[in-house]
Image (cartoon, helix red, strand yellow):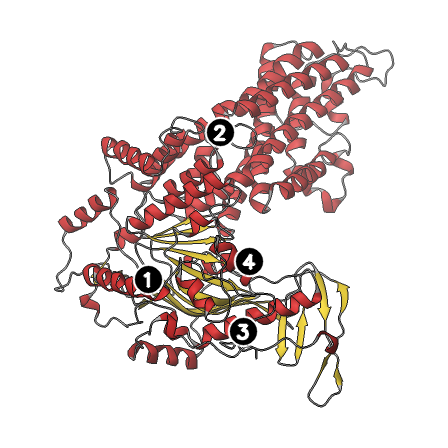
Amino acid sequence: MVNFGGNKISAGMGKLVAFGGNGVGQLLTAVAVALLVRLFSGPGPVLLPEGGSDSDYDDDGEAESPAGEHAGIEAQAAGKVAPVTIRWSNITCSLSDKSGKSVRFLLRNVCGEAKPGRLLALMGPSGSGKTTLLNVLAGQLGASPRLHLSGLLEINGRRSAKRDLKIAYVRQEDLFFSQLTVRETLSLAVELQLSDRLSVEERDEYVDNIIYRLGLVNCAGSNVGDAKVRGISGGEKKRLSLACELIASPSVIFADEPTTGLDAFQAEKVMETLWQLAEDGHTVICSIHQPRGSVYMKFDDILLLAEGSIVYAGPAKEEPLTYFSKFGYLCPDHVNPAEFLADLISIDYSSADSVYTSQKRINGLVEAFQRNTSLILYVTPLVKEMGFKKRIAVSRNSLAEKKGSWWSQFWLLLRRAWMQASRDGPTNKVRARMSIASAVIFGSVFWRMGRSQTSIQDRMGLLQVAAINTAMAALTKTVGVFPKERAIVDRERAKGSYALGPYLLSKLLAEIPIGAAFPLLFGTILYPMARLHPALSRFGRFCGIVTVESFAASAMGLTVGAMVPTTEAAMALGPSLMTVFIVFGGYYVNADNTPVIFRWIPKVSLIRWAFQGLCINEFRGLQFEHQNSFDLQTGEQVLERHSLGGVSINDTLIAQGRILLFWYYTTYFLLQKNKPKYQLLELPPPEQLQKLEQLELNPIDPPPLNQVEPSQQLESPPSDQFLPFILEAAACVPYILSADCVVFMPEKLILASYWFLNPSGSRRSI
């Protein structure tokens, strides 16, 4: 193992000056403040025990009255926060490969604590496990059969494996409906989550308070925007994400690298908002890579991770610098402490020698922290709170909001879907131009068709390309938009804002006027230019058939978008499926000649039913010029020749309606089945659990930080005792096999192996 010594300092560090002054006095001050806060705040709220009744009890064991529940609702609407303390210990997360022969540890025995009124920052280099730990604490770690997660999680001193607590989770990606303004986004979110609890005036006042609190006053009337339409800035989007998460007054706020993609000014504004939320009583936990100095000074607590292990956990600001100075690592004057800490716990891949040196340094720091965990992890000792009746109970209504009625959700979602669809000017303009351009091109090619024998083929070709064009236009629009919208819907459903049924129905109805406009525009231009069957009723049925086909293609696009995870995958799968339906669409392959094993495909092909309906509408009643006895004289003969007769137009519309319902039902089933699943936190091994219980029952009073004993430092071996060789590789991680056996496998960079001399003097190959 790698040890550290108090007198030995690593080569190249030199004599440096410590940053920040007297760490002992600051530590004593922090201890005093923590004791005062703990004394006046008292224990935080706890969850009801699993399997308990829905009745809540106060300190005297009396049932909570309806008036008390109403007061709790008013307190929530007023923005009051119930204090919550989260403690975790022995969090271990490992990922095995597909063969199950090797395991990679993402987290190793991670412990920590997050308190109300304090901002905890998870820091570390890329791949250190920051986001993994944040997802574990928030209960948002995606489930996988190759993932194993164990550890102990306590909420206000009570063990909890279920994520019943109301939390806010701000992800790196800020996803919103682009055509809604900031105020409309917040108003709809408030109505969906608190529709039965606030009046219209209270709701408007609540939204105004959130807008003012998050600094969104200047952009309240601006559209959110997206990549196509310019909207609010990145920092404003991040604060809008926070505002949407704060609607239900959550006690705990998780933020995954909230400064990613922002400039220094916007990043500081976002972190200032998080700091202010912590000052208001929230428990705030965020992951961050390398903040600027002014942002670092806003942190109350910090947890440093390196390769899934803790290097330091405790108060921020000067305390980490004082702690590392005990091992000879001093932060120079006028240097950002965050940069110093990031460099200290990062591996330098510039050379094989630097990889070994930095890896040895990190392993020694991890080992040193593990030996002193009980002494330096918490300012206050871990004390197990005994007696459930003495705790402050939190009503279940404050942990899981009651959703509004089915119809109230439907009307709210219908209004939002209509605003998004009707205001999407760029998309609607492109679709309108494409409809006009397609109609003009097809009309020019098939200009004023006559009644000759050759016009039969022209008419069928025109009807086929009309059916294909309509379906493909609707499909590509849907698969290009829905995967992004699905991510928003999944997040809102995870918060319990609404059910899946009202969303799908509202989306279908809201898109009817917009979706019908483009097929009608296409048919209005094409029909007279090609001089199809000259009857107003036939023109109306032509437009009706292509409109229903457009809706069916959109429903198919929803299914494709629900089936695959990304827009790119949807754009690849959707046209491929449509190509199959085109082949069996009735024009290229006669239905009577279709192989038996494929005869089910024409029955589910929306292209085939649309094409057949258009042919019946066009050819029935038409008379064609003929000169020979074998010429086709009537439109009915044409339909019979191509196996398109035997049904009516209504039958084709009904068939398309069934296809539409099938795709909508499949979409509902896929969204219901593919909803996010999260990894369950298993209890640690019994021996670790017993050790933790002993620590809780017999807490250790921590000494001042300057009394932490540094360990002995291990000198680097001479460079001539190992022979490096470099081999290109990918997706590897460093491992320490033993004291004299090390293998370094950096991720996506190099594979550096070493031959060391063992104590007997013989070479050992790794």
Per the model, the C-alpha gap separating discs 3 and 1 is 26 Å
Q: Is residue 43 visible?
A: no
Q: Amino acid at mark 1?
A: Gln
Residue marked by disc 1: 26
Secondary structure at numbered mark 2? loop
Residue marked by disc 3: 364
Residue marked by disc 4: 125
Dot 1 alpha-carbon crowd within 10 angstroms: few under 14, some 14 to 19, many 20 or more: some
Q: Mark 4, mark 1: which one is toward the viewer?
A: 1
| Tag 4 near tag 3, CB within 8 Å | no
The x and y percentages for residue 249 are 30, 47
Q: Quarter of the image for the N terminus: give it.
A: bottom right
Q: Amino acid at mark 3?
A: Gly
Secondary structure at numbered mark 4? loop
| Tag 4 near tag 1, CB within 8 Å | no
Q: Earlier in the sequence, mark 4 or mark 3?
A: 4
Q: Quadrant of residue 386?
A: bottom left
- In the rendered image, the vertical position of residue 174 relative to residue 627, given as above or below: below
Q: Is residue 455 visible?
A: yes
Per the model, the C-alpha gap separating discs 2 and 3 is 49 Å
Q: Amino acid at mark 4?
A: Pro
Q: Residue 231's mark?
A: 2
